[in-house]
Image: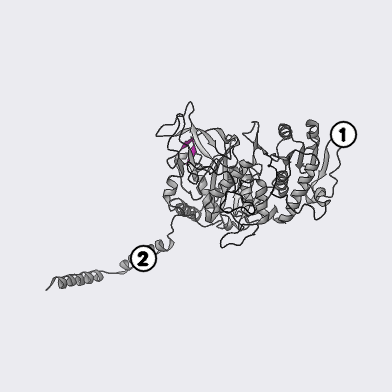
């Protein structure tokens, strides 16, 4: 008998013995094995981003100066290239091969009005919507009507001799319209004052900024106190809501001496001819845009810092935010952006301008601020992108954590966290599961949440565990940034696909890599020294989005093994 015959005989005997021992337990075990393998094959997903891209998130300079760490930059702007300074605006007739202008806020509004630019395979001229949420009631605004208001208000303020225009309003269309009006008309410097500050703080901010004009809302602005304490005020524009427009807001109270010229927003707009102000001033030959003054609110009890940002600082911050999101996930007309934090926060303002430039729809609500209720702020709308303060997100986290009491809830949370952290896959939204907050009228549409640590401002800490829990309970990616008074937008922010848990960072999560408009170095302090093994020291940031091109933040940081920035 040949070798082959012996082999076949042995195989036949083995199979006979195997099946002779087969029973119901064998069937159950094989069935279970097939089900497990089939489940793994069907449910397997590739990570949202390759792990190696998270291992080195920033690029360090090849050499470092004594007493400093290397200079760290985003991979999109390697050393030897200029940092991202603007929007690359190309005027009509310019060669498509030429480099465009950096632009300013006027170009952002022009893009919002014109719609999306022409791109291969995509229609041009698609515009976003402007909405105001009054609880469940939604008010839609025409972009052309807002353009008319921008022109009429800007012309009025300019003709009245206004120069420094303080804007003291909650998040609203009127706040944005006043900001753009000051940009389109010469010599008008907008001053953004945080809404709801104490009377003495408000007077101090008006005095420090030398404001001569105030645009504000009745009932929120202490007219008598301000006029008595700050006689330099010359103009006042009331923005009355629909329920108060029947009242005469032009009357100056007795004893004021008529020193303040009072007008209402509605009169300025309604008394002008219908055809007036429908066209924006031409871009050709326009004067250089004025700076924007913003007050940085520090820790309670400290004096708020007044910062003067140039238009270049702001458009550089907008350009960095445009570059920070992967191309397939960038904001567009299908998105609805809602700022649940105050627009007087420069990070929130930069993101809102980014949404306008991207032709995303914009929803504004007066329920916005450091401790806004996210559920209440999103009532009546279905946002896809939200910017919120750490205080607001901590409230969401605490509320959702309290509901994780049942075994099914804990199991679902564990499975989704495992998918997020170990597999690198963002789980689909489960905000309708009963123990997760229902953000907006359609929670499953929410895909991205921005939040930021405010250096030297006493912001509550968000750990990597809290950020992970927020991603799970909101069903959305969460971007965590480091911001500072002297920097428009962000110093650094976490990557779009970075879902990792890093307990070694402590109570504060890391802040990712610098954005494309900044570069970061760590400068030695008496207690912290950089060595070849460990880079740590005071955080210093440079770039076109930084006031004066360089600023020391007054807080200490370190560079982690993955080249991300974190507090010491």
Q: Which residue is mark 1?
A: 257
- Kindly report the secondary structure that dominates the magenta region of the rendered protein: strand
- Residues tagged 1 and 2 counted as in contact (Cβ below 8 A): no
Q: Is residue 213 left or right of residue 466?
A: right
Of the pair 20 and 539, the residue shown nearer to us: 539
Label 1 neighbour load within 10 Å: few <14, some 14-19, many 20+:
few
Image mark for residue 34: 2
Residue 460 location, quadrant: top right
Task: Give percent across and percent down for residue 565.
Answer: 49, 39
- In the foreground, 7 or 540: 540
Q: Position of residue 449 (x, y in %)?
A: 57, 49
Segment tinted magenta in the rendering: 554-568
Q: Which mark is residue 323?
A: none
Q: Is residue 485 visible?
A: no
Q: What residue appears at the point 49 percent right and 53 percent down from the top-left corner? A: 413
Task: Kindly identify the residue that appears in the image at 36 percent across and 64 percent down.
Answer: 32
Give the mark, 1 or 2, whose residue is nearer the N terminus. Answer: 2
């Amino acid at each position: 008998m040949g070798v082959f015959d012996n082999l076949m005989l042995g195989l036949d005997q083995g199979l006979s013995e195997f099946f002779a021992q087969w029973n119901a337990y064998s069937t159950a075990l094989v069935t279970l094995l097939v089900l497990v393998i089939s489940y793994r094959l069907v449910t397997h997903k590739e990570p949202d981003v390759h792990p190696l891209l998270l291992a080195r998130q920033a690029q360090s300079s090849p050499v470092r100066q004594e007493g400093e760490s290397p200079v760290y930059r985003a991979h999109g702007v390697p050393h030897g290239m200029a940092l991202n300074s603007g929007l690359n605006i190309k005027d009509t007739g310019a060669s498509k091969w030429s480099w465009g202008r950096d632009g300013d806020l006027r170009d952002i509004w022009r893009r919002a009005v014109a719609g999306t630019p022409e791109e291969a395979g995509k229609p041009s001229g698609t515009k976003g919507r402007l909405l105001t949420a009054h609880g469940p009631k939604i008010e839609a605004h025409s972009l052309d009507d807002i353009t008319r208001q921008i022109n009429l208000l800007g012309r009025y303020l300019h003709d009245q001799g206004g120069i420094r225009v303080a804007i003291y309003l909650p998040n609203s269309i009127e706040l944005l319209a006043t900001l753009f009006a000051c940009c389109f008309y010469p010599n008008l410097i907008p001053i953004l004052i945080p809404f709801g500050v104490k009377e003495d703080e408000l007077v101090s901010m008006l005095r420090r900024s030398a404001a001569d004009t105030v645009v504000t809302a009745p009932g929120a602005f202490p007219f008598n106190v301000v006029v008595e304490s700050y006689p330099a005020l010359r103009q006042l524009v009331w923005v009355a809501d629909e329920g108060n427009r029947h009242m005469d807001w032009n009357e100056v109270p007795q004893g004021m001496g008529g020193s303040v010229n009072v007008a209402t927003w509605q009169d300025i707009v309604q008394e002008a001819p219908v055809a007036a102000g429908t066209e924006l001033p031409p871009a050709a030959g326009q004067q250089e845009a004025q700076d924007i003054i913003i007050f940085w609110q520090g820790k309670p009890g400290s004096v708020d810092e007044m910062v003067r940002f140039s238009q270049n600082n702001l458009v550089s911050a907008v350009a960095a935010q445009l570059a920070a999101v992967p191309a397939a996930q960038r904001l567009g007309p299908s998105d609805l952006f809602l700022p649940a934090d105050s627009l007087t926060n420069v990070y929130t303002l930069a993101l809102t301008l980014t949404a306008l430039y991207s032709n995303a729809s914009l929803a504004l609500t007066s329920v916005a601020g450091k401790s806004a209720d996210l559920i209440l702020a999103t009532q009546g709308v279905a946002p896809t992108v939200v910017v919120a303060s750490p205080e607001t997100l901590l409230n969401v986290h605490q509320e959702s954590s309290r509901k994780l009491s049942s075994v099914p809830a804990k199991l679902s949370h564990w499975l989704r966290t495992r998918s997020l952290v170990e597999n690198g896959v963002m789980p689909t939204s489960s905000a309708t599961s009963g123990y997760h907050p229902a953000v907006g009228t359609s929670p499953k549409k929410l895909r991205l949440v921005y939040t930021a640590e405010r250096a030297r401002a006493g912001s509550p800490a968000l750990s990597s565990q809290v950020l992970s829990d927020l991603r799970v309970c909101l069903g959305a990616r969460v971007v965590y940034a480091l911001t500072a008074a002297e920097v428009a937008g962000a110093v650094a922010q976490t990557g779009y696909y970075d879902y990792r848990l890093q307990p070694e960072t402590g109570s504060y999560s890391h802040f990712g890599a610098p954005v494309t408009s900044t570069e970061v170095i760590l400068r030695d302090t008496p207690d912290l020294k950089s060595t070849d093994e460990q880079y740590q020291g005071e955080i210093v940031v440079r770039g076109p989005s930084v006031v004066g091109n360089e600023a020391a933040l007054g807080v200490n940081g370190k560079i982690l093994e993955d080249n991300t920035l974190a507090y010491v």
